[in-house]
Amino acid sequence: MATSKLMKKDLADPRVQAVLDCANTARTILQDRSTLPTALFAQIESYVKQSLPHLKSAAIADKCRDFDLVGIDLWNYSAHLLHEDGPRDPRIKVVNEVHSGVVTRVFALLLLAAAHAVSSRHNTDDPGQKIRIMKVALRASRLCLDREELELASISLQRCSDFIPVESAEDVPLIRIANNHTKDQECSHDDFGALVNEYYLLRLLHSWKSDRLDLADHFYSKISQRADCAEADMTVKQADLMYEVARSLAKTGQSDIAVKWFERAIATLDRCDAQSVTQDVEELRLCTGVAFVELLVSDERDVSHQRAWEILEQLEATHGLYNRVAVQATRFRILAAQRQIDEELILQSLLRIVKMTVLTESSFKTAMKVLRQASKVASSSSLTALAELIHTRLLPELRDTHEKDSTIQCWLEKATVAYILCAKSPASTPQEISVVGIRELLDRIKSEIPALCFTGKATHAAQTLIWQAATGPNTGEWLHLLRHPVFDNAGHLNRARVGRKLMRHAMDHEDFSAAREAFFQMPKSTQDESITRYLAFKLALQSQDDELAMDSLKVVARKAGNDPTYLYACVIEAQKSSMRHMGVAALQAIVGKRPQGVNLTALLRCTARLLMTELDEPGQNLDEVALQVIEIFENAFRSVDELRKLSKDSWRTEVQWWSKNAYNLGVRLCTDIRPESTVRLLETCTSFMDNCPMEDAADLESDIENRRMLCAYLATTALVALGRSGSEDDEYTLQGYLHAQKHIKTFKQLHAKLRRTMHGDTAMQHEQRHFSVLKFELECILRLRQWHNLEVALQACLNSNIDEHWDTLADIVIIIHDQLDTHSLGSETDTLIRDVLQRAVDHCWKAQYDIVKIARWLRFAFTLCLDHIQDDFSYKLLLQAATIAEKARSPDQPSQDLYPDAELQWLATTGFNHAVDLIAVENHTEATKWMEGALELARWVMDEGALHALFTEKRRLADERAANTRG
């Protein structure tokens, strides 16, 4: 048995010694005010949370004194860790010093508690040691809770609980004391009872911070059962803790639970002996009551509001609290939360606050906060109370001071600004009443203290509010308030803004005399500011004052070195007025002078706008105005290098503006101005579009290419029209056709690129334009005699899928064929011309075009094919003519659509003669076919069958002659 005990002791000794060695090492380090190494701290933390609390007392019996001494030293030496603020070498990795201090103190507590557990077995009658360890444990618990170390706090509180005796269900004393106790023992008993009370408070605090409100309720019941908890100091601690719990719950939205803890806080304060009530108790009662009322009034239930009134009545009944501003502010909050607002009661409450407020910084802020809140529910009452504060408290106080009191003046300014803010708010009285009230308030301030002027900061705030209120029918009256003498400290910028605002208001109401008065009342320096002179220029335009307009424009131009914005604005205003000549003249002068910093392209843009407006004026010579506009656009394009210096976005915007306006003008004026002008305008537009940046603008590229294609089409049309108007061999005319070919090439390239992306009506429209351009190309080839390009152009026409307007193409092809010489006419060209004519005949016949033209084209194609011995195609044309003539004779066709007799006779005769030629070469098969075709065509000649009879007789003779020859 002895051997077994010895073996257990040997097993326990290493653990105890390890703990003691760790503690001694930490003591040595902390004694030098050094920081615990990370490894050592981890070992201490492990002992605190795992090993040390579970060591048996018997294992450390021999080390009891060592544990006690090292625990005391660790507790004392760890103090510097809790307040360590000195710099440390960032290269050394250390633990958080405050956290390590907390852990070290808990470690010290556990060492002391372990030592006490062993020593108490030998000295059970020493209450001093118990109180000593209890105090250390409570201090450690308080430290852990203050540092939010809840796990460590739980360990410390567990050590405290070891000293708390188990109580019965009845309310019995904590420790039963025999009748022969000494006086010292009674004192120890009282001290221990206070420690027990503090233990339960810390338990409650720990439960709250751990979100264990059920445990908090349990420990609250423990506290409420103790008779010695009614002392003043303990009551304040209890009530303060419950107040903090309630307030935190209210912030997190747990209103019902917060109400319970507020009630507990108030009940705890009510248990205080009236004779022991201190100032701290009253302040805590006030804070608790105010916070409780705020929570209750946020609840819309009547029972909550009723309870709020009860709390308020309790506060007012408490000695020394009735005259507190916070109590009256609480009364206001209850009144403001009622369903039916009683403005009279609110006014009484506000006036009471104004009357009893002691003029200190904090009380003034409290009063102003309440008055500002009142403006949201009872604006008229708030205005009355603010005026009362200014008239009865602040002005007399400021007037009676022999020296200028900046603090009181600051309060006066804040109250005045608050009055203006309340007066201008939508919930306040009508604006005409607000303006009068503000004016009377400012007049009274100035009359009672004539030398008083608001500081620059207050002036700016007040004028800003008045400025914002200057809308509606009373704008003028609000604006005149801005010039009140109390605002004489307004800065130069504010004075200028006020003057310009008055000018704008007068001009908006066409009160030009008032606007001139506001302008000439400004200082000279303000008058000569660009924005002021811009307004003066605008005023001059409206009042038809040429002299003022010119003077103002000169000043604006002179000051436009850094920012020509107002100069451009003057041009725009002139453009919108009836005095446009003023804008044009000014722009021309500015362009001539080119003052430093002025952007020439921007000036040209303004001029372009003005001139484009002139195009809309009735009676204008469009050609002359258009030439001026074109010159402006060409000048702008010559400045394109200057435009490239702008930012990317500005460069894109500028180029798009010029290209779009040139495009719109070209489309709009192409039929009204000379072709040369149209071409110049469209080419300028194309030049701008060629320079338009396409980065980050993929959606813009397609639009620009479509516009470029239309510009090329319109320019081609204008150049061809110009060429047609001249003589055939005129050099200027030929240059026009050469110029047109450049635009034709551009159009064809863009059309080939975009045709696949077009659909519906848009695609058809572009195809029609493309077909027109192809005809223009043939016309250019004809006039320039560029026969080497003819085959490609004809093939392009045949590739077109357009079914309309082939009549003009056929006419052009016929003229081209007449102009071709034998060296230029090849078989391929001849075939293409034939195909074009055949296509024209087919499309025009289907579309019921003029049959005379169809007959002429068919005759020309027939002759062309017959001359080149293309018998098969010629024969088909002969039959096609017969078919057309037959359908033209149908009853549903009008008489004017009959195939011309002369054309029929010529075709029939030519076809029959060709058959005779075939007989001569002994091609009887083809001859028979041609004779039958000629006879079929002769049937429809309107000669009563004479031609058909003639051909029949001649055919008989030809057949007989052929038979005799064969016989």
Image: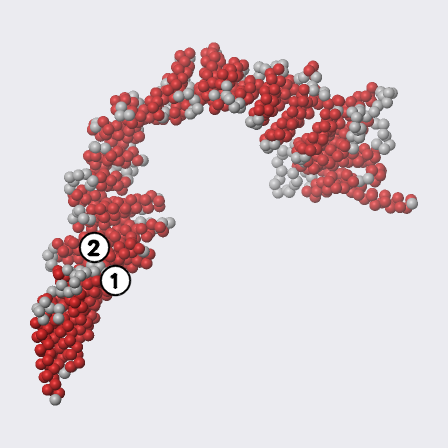
Q: Which residue position holds label 1?
A: 800
Quick one: 98 or 410, which is closer to the camera? 410
Q: Amino acid at mark 1?
A: Ser
Q: Secondary structure at mark 2?
A: helix
Quick one: 162 or 770, which is closer to the camera? 770
Between disc 2 and disc 1, the foreground one is: 1
Mark 2 near mark 1, Cβ–Cβ under 8 Å?
A: no
Q: Is 947 on the left or on the right of 668, as rendered?
A: left
Q: Is residue 756 above or below residue 43?
A: below
Q: Which residue appears at 11% of the width and 78% of the height?
A: 955
Where does the image place residue 152, in percent across and percent down from the top left?
70, 36
Is residue 831 at all visible to an observer of this figure? yes
Q: Quadrant of the C terminus?
A: bottom left
Q: Which mark is residue 716?
A: 2
Q: Which residue appears at 72% of the width and 20% of the height?
A: 231
Q: Amino acid at mark 2?
A: Thr
